Image (tube, rainbow, N blue to C red):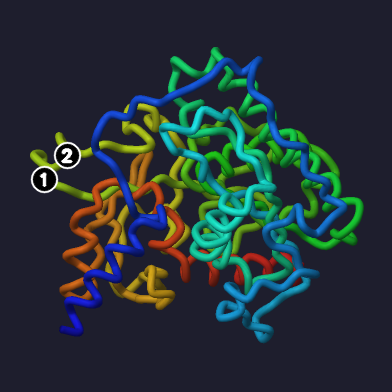
Amino acid sequence: MKHIILVLTSFSLLSCGLLSESNSPIEYNSQSFNEFKPSAAPDYELLKSWAVHPENKLELLSEFENENSKLPVDVFFIYPTMLSDKNDTSWNANIYDLKTRDYVLGSSIKFQSSAWYSVGDLYVPFYRQAHLRVFRESFWKNGGEKAYEMAYQDIRQAFITYLSKYNNSKPIIIAGHSQGAGHAKRLLKEFFDGKPLQKKLIAAYLIGTKVINEDFEHINHMTSAEQTGGFVTWNTYRVMSSSKEKKASYTISKDWIKGAICSNPITWDEKNSTDYKDHKGFLYLNNKIFPKTVKIENIDDKVMVKLPKMGLVKRILLSTVKDYHKADINLFWEDIRVNSIVRSKKYLSE
């Protein structure tokens, strides 16, 4: 009976979006961008425009608090695409909508940004993110590009406000996932790359997007665990049989990711595989961390991992998931947390 309840509970948790997926082609409803009326822009002088802010403690992150490890550094995190309903014709999210805010908090904030919560002061702005359909070529020139630009301008303003009002010259970690990592990459180009602020950069975690050598002039790919001032990046895929591979549908296509720079999110060096013993911890949907459960089989322009080695029930549930994009952070949650602390301590000691 206990196992049946656990299975039912786990399936309900999958609906939070971090591990859920659809293998069916999606047809999106839409509207003209010129007819779309976006919500008012966030005012980042106000705490209500921040999903996470040191002056506004969140109960859902309290279990990730660790004052013993917290360092005098800041983390600026940008969450991924949460606006994906195929029937939603809006181009950008309304951050004043309570359901939207709750969804962001209960998914990306809890299971992704939490990796940095005990590292330093965490800042996560609510922003008018672009709808998932903007990444379809057919929508990009028909409103998608403008929607994406609106999203970035919110992030840009949040960062400007953060620098002027809250940073107080502290060193900074920039982190983001998927759409958030895309905006983080642009933020680095505009504010850090070859500019005075680059001296304050501890590290950038550009996760779930494509980064190539030409993206930056002065910010380098870090290839050791203690290196600072550069970036790490990866996209995660599951090792599968050829028959399962043919049926899989990916958020980030393997064709698009070709040529991308890819980091090892377990050893943080240039090794292209790992053993289970190297893995520090997968944050599962029950808020528990499972170490020694993820094995990297190969790294080229992407990270290929085997099905996580967990208990029978969890393993069965995870076996249904073929697209690991939404778990880019969960799978290596404790590895990211520990590495962020290592890099921060290294920066502060220099």
- Amino acid type indicated by mark 1: Ser
- Residue that label 2 marks: 245
Residue 249: where, in percent of width, then height? Answer: 26, 36
| Left or right: where 229 falls relative to 179 | right
| Left or right: where 107 falls relative to 274 | right
Q: Which secondary structure, mark 2?
A: helix
Q: Which residue is drawn at 64% across and 48% down?
A: 97
Residue 225: where, in percent of width, then height? Answer: 53, 63
Q: Which of these two is toward me, 194 or 151?
A: 151
Quarter location, residue 62: bottom right
The tag on residue 241 is 1
The tag on residue 337 is none
Q: Which of these two is toward me, 212 or 137?
A: 137
Can you say which quadrant of the picture contains the C terminus? bottom right
- Amino acid type indicated by mark 2: Glu
Residue 2: where, in percent of width, then height? Answer: 20, 84
